[in-house]
Amino acid sequence: MAKSLREVLSGSLTENELKRVRAFDIVGDIAVLKLPEELLPKKKLIGEGVLKVHRNVKTVLLQTTPVRGEFRTREFEVLAGEPRTKTIHRESGCEFKVDLARVYFSPRLAYERMRIARMVTEGEVVTNLFAGVGCYSIVLAKHSEVGKVYSIDKNPEAFRLMCENIRLNRVGGKVVPLLGDAGDVVKKGLEGKADRVLMPLPEFSRNFIDIAVSALKPEGGVIHFYDVGEEPDPFSPSIEFLSEKICKKKFKIKVLERRIIRSYAVRCYHVVLDLLLQR
Ligand SMILES: C[S@@+](CC[C@H](N)C(=O)[O-])C[C@H]1O[C@@H](n2cnc3c(N)ncnc32)[C@H](O)[C@@H]1O
């Protein structure tokens, strides 16, 4: 019978140490661990343990920095298995090539990507301002009747992988990959085109709200605005900010949905607001 990680590690870690080994992400065939300082002396043992327990995992990585910088990337150390950061992740019937050291990717957004896909109606034009390797755009193209998804990213490696992923998932007729700063790309040819705009860059999305509004059709549409929210009220500061900005553009704003996607830290959340903008 397959052993649990706890059973495999129980000879090498104390009960207290075992409690501190947290759940981890599996991306394709790579396990991504975060470990507290006091477990670092035993990191290799833990890595080998993960490899033993998860037969489909070929590489175990330790995340050594937070997600950071404009491209939202992080650094890793290989703990066990094949020394690589590239893999193919399968999600909702799609395949995504990723290089974890060079692009942003999180398997934890799978539900959110499908949630948006379910809202898209036939023939819609969608502009994805921060597309990464194309995950939202490709899930939308596969699972909705979307007409076109303009899919922008500034990271050249994310753009290259997005182009590969569009081919891999055969959605080239619907997803248009665009390399560059979202603001520049929209100003150069995407103003007034979209029924729906995605802004999946919670840390900096506020800087791009004017761009998102200008990407919508003149009559308005929907913006999915991702932000960072804190207790005791994770949504009100975002709504106040948006109301002020959007009123200036002469749109009425209705919050269709607000939800917490996941927790970032104690009392701090990754949130989304679905906004309907109308004249
Ligand atoms: C949090 S990731 C979103 C990834 C993607 N939506 C997904 O589901 O995997 C944010 C992305 O925005 C890109 N980015 C950051 N600033 C940008 C900008 N000014 N214009 C276009 N893309 C940008 C980063 O390179 C990164 O790939």
Image: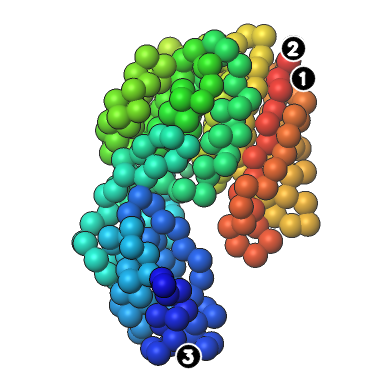
Amino acid at the residue labelled 3: Thr
Q: Is residue 90 above or below residue 84?
A: above
Q: Secondary structure at mark 3?
A: loop
Residue 33, image x, y percentages: 41, 66
Q: Secondary structure at mark 1?
A: strand
Residue 6, image x, y percentages: 47, 79
- As drawn, is 100 to the left or to the right of 238? left
Q: Residues within 10 Å of mark 3 (few under 14, many from 20)?
A: few
Tell me the mark number nearer the camera, choosing from 3 and 1.
3
Which residue sits at x=56%, y=34%?
Answer: 114
Which badge, 1 or 2, is on the more N-terminal residue? 1
- As drawn, is 155 to the left or to the right of 109? left
Could you say which disc has been placed on residue 271 in the image?
none
Along the line of sight, the residue nearer the viewer: 5 or 182: 5
Which residue sits at x=41%, y=56%?
Answer: 26
Which image quadrant shows ligand 1? top left
Could you say which disc has been placed on residue 252 in the image?
1
Which badge, 3 or 1, is on the more N-terminal residue? 3
Q: Secondary structure at mark 2?
A: loop
Q: Which residue position holds label 3?
A: 14
Is residue 246 shown to the viewer in this render?
Answer: yes
Q: Are marks 2 and 3 in contact (CB under 8 Å)?
A: no
Amino acid at the residue labelled 2: Arg
Q: Residues within 10 Å of mark 2 (few under 14, many from 20)?
A: few
Q: Are marks 3 and 1 in contact (CB under 8 Å)?
A: no
Q: Quadrant of the C terminus?
A: top right
Along the line of sight, the residue nearer the viewer: 169 or 158: 169
Q: Residues within 10 Å of mark 1 (few under 14, many from 20)?
A: some
Q: Are marks 1 and 2 in contact (CB under 8 Å)?
A: yes
Q: Is residue 103 above or below residue 195?
A: below
Q: Which residue position holds label 2?
A: 279
Along the line of sight, the residue nearer the viewer: 241 or 159: 159
